[in-house]
Image (cartoon, rainbow, N blue to C red):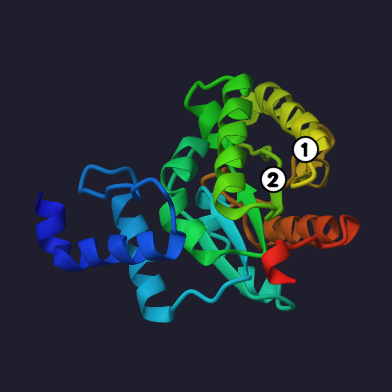
Amino acid sequence: MRFCRVWGGCLAGFLIFVAHQTHAAEPVPSLTEDSPFATEIYTFLVEDQVMGIPPCRTLFVGSSSIRFWFTLQSDFADREIVRRGFGGAQLEHVIMYFDLVVTPHRPRSIVLYGGENDIYADKTPQNVLDDLQTLMSLKSRRLGDVPVYFISIKPSKARFGQLELQAEANQLVRRLADQRDDLFFVNVVPAMMEDGAPKDIFIDDDLHMNLDGYDLWTKAVQNAFARHGDPKASACH
């Protein structure tokens, strides 16, 4: 395929490298020019090859709200961070690329943002829960007891009409987190709302946050780390 010709035999080499890193029984996902978010995923593979993959970092993964978190490392200066947010990813895409962008890093913990684009794509709150359960099962098979912090689906001006569905999905995720020792629910909704509407913490598209919004997220995630004792994968102790 043209994708593979342009990015060459090195792509195959990267996938072999990933397979070696994951020790997965199943083959790693294929990546072609028609793959969702192919350019972004390929860039992650290149970055891993160039920079190496130190284990036991905190890995942030999910959609563009993670991708555009440009201050992530400075916001969490007390730990090593790897950022793996891509495009308009839904949870199904995080599942699809888990063995390419998550498993090789053997993180100490995972911070996940997903579900918002799923609801926007007319998936139901139950669909969000089902995909999260699939993702958690995959995480357990690949990475064992690595803790996952799920950032709640955020309210925004652009998608305020979906607030009720978002709240229902958040509630389902919260209940799942109550049932698992390796999943923690980080509720950012109250901090982002004021007088029944989203705060003025968005860039011009009314969807993605500015620095004030990310400051709220940073505090919420840091508080979640502290509240739960900052658990980490047993391999990282």
Asked whether, in this view, residue 176 is left or right of residue 32, the answer is right
Q: Mark 1 points at which residue?
A: 177
Q: What type is the residue that disc 1 sits on?
A: Ala
Asked whether, in this view, residue 168 is left or right of residue 27, the answer is right
Q: In this view, does 54 lie above or below 58?
A: below
Q: Position of residue 99 (x, y in %)?
A: 44, 52
Which type of secondary structure does the marked residue at label 2 adopt?
Answer: strand
Q: Which residue is nearer to you in this view: 118 or 131? A: 131
Q: Residue at x 20, y 48 (%)?
A: 33
Q: In this view, does 163 lie above or below 234?
A: above
Q: Which residue, as the protein is rendered here, is positioned at the far front?
A: 25
Question: Is there any visible trace of residue 71 in the rendered image?
Answer: no
**Label 1 to label 2: alpha-carbon separation:** 9 Å
Asked whether, in this view, residue 1 is left or right of residue 55, the answer is left
Q: Where is residue 175 in the image (x, y as percent from the top left)?
A: 79, 29
Q: Position of residue 4 (x, y in %)?
A: 15, 56
Asked whether, in this view, residue 75 is left or right of residue 230, the answer is left
Q: Mark 2 points at which residue?
A: 150
**Of the image marks 1 and 2, the number of the one nearer the N terminus:** 2
Q: Which residue is nearer to you in this view: 126 or 122? A: 126
Q: In this view, does 166 lie above or below 136?
A: above
Question: Is there any visible trace of residue 47 in the rendered image?
Answer: yes
Specify few, some or many for label 1: CA neighbours under 10 Å numbering under 14, 14-19, or 20 or more: some
